[in-house]
Image: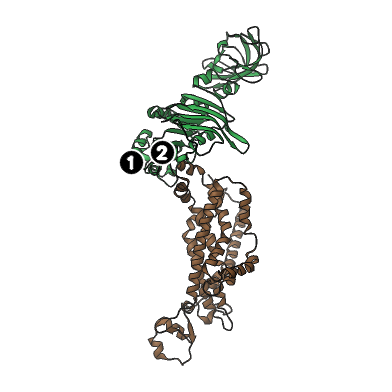
């Protein structure tokens, strides 16, 4: 880049920066809505224009995580004073937390959240490990019809998933995989596998095969060379692939809605199901969504070092 | 230490035979250099011996044992690559220890330390042991690669152009070091290169490979002075040998459209031939035989390489650096009749 930049170029740069900032603001506005509404009192949730300055509170999260009922008796200051602070918050809103004996009854949200975690993590692990091994095979060994096979793997991604949803539903019902964790895990693994194979193939191709060959000659078996030499080199690719697979599995809505309803229901179909009829408490919806965003954010943040290299794919060559 | 034998080995990639009926015999403790242009099948030959490729046909023996069924790890040969030879993320010490920690060898920690210390001393890389491999220079990297081969005390060393990525100075010094190392270890070395200077300066024996076939095997002296055909003659030597058409008749060679006439040293059959003469066998000076136009002069310090032209024929001669030579001037020259090479004009095979 030249040190001397023309004034016209400078002006263009400024316009570009301002436009990018504007676009970013527009893109981030739903996130802003979720982030703020999750901490708003119910009365401020739907004001027009939106309230920007408010006293943040965590009442929506208490509501999200507990089972509540409407107060049937009149406000009782004695009960209020005897309750812990979180119950007081609910009491203020004209509700009380349901208890069985001394135990607070939790809402279904923690359970659905756990389902999401279990299903997304396990399917990601399976899809990434299978993808890594398959990609290694494709990358290192000559085989008949290699290009066709790779295309076939990719072709599983060409149908919109919703097209196969009905037949999948019927098949799942017959084999009893409906509303099971394992059913969704299989589904998400299959869905992510083609992506994982293709992505990992690119990363595997980048690892010089001389490394393993040196290990083979040095007295190691192919499998040992794979674990000792190839895998540590592929960490970046594995991290990038895992993030993508995790995000896909975590966010999946259509299949989860159709295939599950109770036992194995994940968070995406559960959150909108709480909108229900009548009065909707948007602060609870927002807090549910807010918590739902966290795992992906944490996971991506934890792997950011690898991702930065990962998303540039083949851009860095020797 | 071992004797390596290849018997009629063929390796095909698709329809193309990278190695085509190759027969090679490398004696125990020999520094054998496989020399050939790019794509001649040198690396494939090496990989076949190492066990990284399986031959389609033929037999490979290491220490008189057929190794066809043996995997790369069982063959106990060390391979030094041209690139990427070191494990990334490892320190130099870990790299050197890596082959010793394999199940195939199972060395004790004390023995590993001892072997590493010995190799580090031999290669003068002791100060680098704790360094990560990405913080090494090219020459240091190749030294460590060679070290990783040495610590194993393998039956044979296979080297795939290990010096070709280094700069000229370093290449020269490592060349001498490698030769010295081989003499010290008394191991079998198979060294692959496309650089004829490397081959001539290091090899006890040189095998010239072209299009997957061995063209000639011999000592560097034999290769240089008794080339089997035009390919060998022109591949070896710098500047490369001068070749020109000539006519053999009645014990005389006539070349350069009749301007040059030499008594043929030995009896040769009459007819069209290609003669070859190396630049150092052409004498340039005021008292010589034939006049030539000076096309170009390269000063090499100890000597000058002068490109001469007679009619349309160009050829290179070596002249002492003290001799005054001007481009576009005229000078006289003569060929040393004893050093003339005769090749069949049609097939290129030597007629000696």
Residue A84, image quadrant: bottom left
Say if residue A311 shows up in the picture.
yes
Q: Chain of mark 2?
A: B
Residue B10 location in percent, x, y? Answer: 57, 33
Residue B22 location in percent, x, y? Answer: 55, 29
Determine crowd level at label 1: few under 14, some 14-19, many 20+ residues with C-alpha closer than 10 A: some
Q: Tell me, what hue is chain A?
A: brown
Instruction: Residue under label 2, please give it.
Output: B148
Q: Nearer the viewer, residue A153 or B306?
A: A153
Classify A223 as above or below B285: below
What chain is the green one? B
User: Badges 1 and 2: C-beta atoms under 8 Å apart?
Assistant: no
Q: Nearer the viewer, residue B321 or B34?
A: B34
Residue A28 location in percent, x, y? Answer: 56, 67
Q: Residue at x 63, y 8 (%)?
A: B252
Marks 1 and 2 share the same chain: yes
Instruction: Residue under label 1, please give it.
Output: B113
Pick whichever of labels 1 and 2 is earlier in the sequence.
1
Q: Residue at x 59, y 79 (%)?
A: A48
Residue B211 location in percent, x, y? Answer: 59, 30
Q: How many marks?
A: 2
- CA–CA distance in space, label 1 to label 2: 13 Å
SS state under label 1: helix
Classify A95 as above or below A229: below
Classify B157 as above or below A120: above
Q: Chain of mark 1?
A: B
Furthest residue to the bottom?
Answer: A74
């Amino acid at each position: 880049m030249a040190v001397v930049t023309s004034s016209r170029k400078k002006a263009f740069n400024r316009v570009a920066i301002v436009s990018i900032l504007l676009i970013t603001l527009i893109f981030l506005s739903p996130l802003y809505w979720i982030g703020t509404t999750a901490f708003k009192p119910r009365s401020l949730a739907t004001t027009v224009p939106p309230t920007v300055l408010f006293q943040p509170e965590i009442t929506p999260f208490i509501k999200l995580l507990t089972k509540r009922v409407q107060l049937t008796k009149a406000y009782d200051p004695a009960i209020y004073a005897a309750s812990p602070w979180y119950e007081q918050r609910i009491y203020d809103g004209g509700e009380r937390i349901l208890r069985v004996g001394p135990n607070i009854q939790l809402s279904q949200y923690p359970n659905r959240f756990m389902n999401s975690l279990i299903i997304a993590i396990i399917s990601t692990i399976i899809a990434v490990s299978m993808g890594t091994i398959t990609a290694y095979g494709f990358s290192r060994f000559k085989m008949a019809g290699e290009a066709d096979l790779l295309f076939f793997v990719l072709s599983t991604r060409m149908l919109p998933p919703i097209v196969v949803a009905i037949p999948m539903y019927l098949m799942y019902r017959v084999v009893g995989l409906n509303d099971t964790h394992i059913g969704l895990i299989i589904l998400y693994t299959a869905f992510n596998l083609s992506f994982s194979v293709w992505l990992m193939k690119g990363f595997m191709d980048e690892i010089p095969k001389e490394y393993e060959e040196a290990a083979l000659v040095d007295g190691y078996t192919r499998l040992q060379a794979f674990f000792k030499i190839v895998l540590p080199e592929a960490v970046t690719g594995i991290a990038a692939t895992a993030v993508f697979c995790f995000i896909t599995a975590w966010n999946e809505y259509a299949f989860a809605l159709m295939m599950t309803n109770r036992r194995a229901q994940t968070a995406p179909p559960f959150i909108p199901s709480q909108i229900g009829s009548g009065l909707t408490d948007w602060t609870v919806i927002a807090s549910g969504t807010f918590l739902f965003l966290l795992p992906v954010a944490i996971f991506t943040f934890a792997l950011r070092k690898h991702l930065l290299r990962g998303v540039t794919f083949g851009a860095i060559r020797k | 230490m071992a004797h390596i034998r290849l018997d009629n080995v063929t390796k095909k990639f698709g329809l193309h035979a990278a190695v085509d009926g190759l027969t090679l015999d490398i004696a125990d403790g020999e520094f054998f250099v496989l020399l050939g242009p790019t794509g001649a099948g040198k690396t494939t030959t090496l990989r076949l011996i190492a066990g990284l490729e399986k031959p389609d046909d033929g037999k490979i023996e290491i220490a008189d044992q057929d190794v066809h069924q043996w995997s790369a790890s069982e063959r106990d040969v060390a391979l030094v690559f041209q690139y990427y030879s070191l494990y990334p993320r490892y320190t130099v010490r870990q790299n050197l220890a890596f082959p010793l920690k394999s199940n195939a060898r199972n060395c004790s920690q004390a023995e590993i330390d001892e072997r590493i210390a010995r190799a580090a001393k031999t290669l003068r890389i002791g100060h680098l042991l704790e360094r990560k491999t990405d913080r090494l220079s090219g020459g240091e990297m190749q030294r460590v690669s060679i070290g990783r081969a040495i610590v194993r005390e393998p039956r044979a060393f296979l080297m795939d152009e290990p010096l070709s990525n280094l700069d000229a100075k370093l290449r020269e010094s490592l060349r001498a070091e490698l030769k010295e190392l081989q003499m010290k270890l008394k191991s079998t070395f198979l060294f692959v290169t496309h650089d004829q200077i490397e081959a001539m300066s290091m090899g006890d024996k040189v095998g010239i490979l072209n299009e997957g076939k061995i063209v000639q095997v011999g000592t560097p002296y034999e290769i240089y002075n008794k080339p089997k055909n035009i390919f060998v003659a022109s591949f070896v030597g710098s500047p490369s040998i001068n070749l020109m058409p000539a006519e053999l008749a009645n014990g005389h060679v006539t070349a350069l459209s009749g301007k040059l006439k030499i008594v043929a040293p030995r009896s040769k059959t009459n007819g069209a031939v290609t003669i070859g003469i190396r630049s150092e066998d052409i004498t340039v000076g005021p008292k010589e035989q034939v006049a030539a136009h000076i096309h170009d002069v390269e000063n090499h310090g100890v000597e000058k390489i002068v490109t001469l032209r007679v009619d349309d024929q160009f050829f290179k001669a070596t002249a002492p650096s003290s001799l005054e030579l001007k481009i576009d001037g005229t000078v006289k020259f003569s060929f040393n009749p004893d050093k003339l090479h005769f090749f069949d004009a049609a097939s290129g095979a030597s007629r000696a």
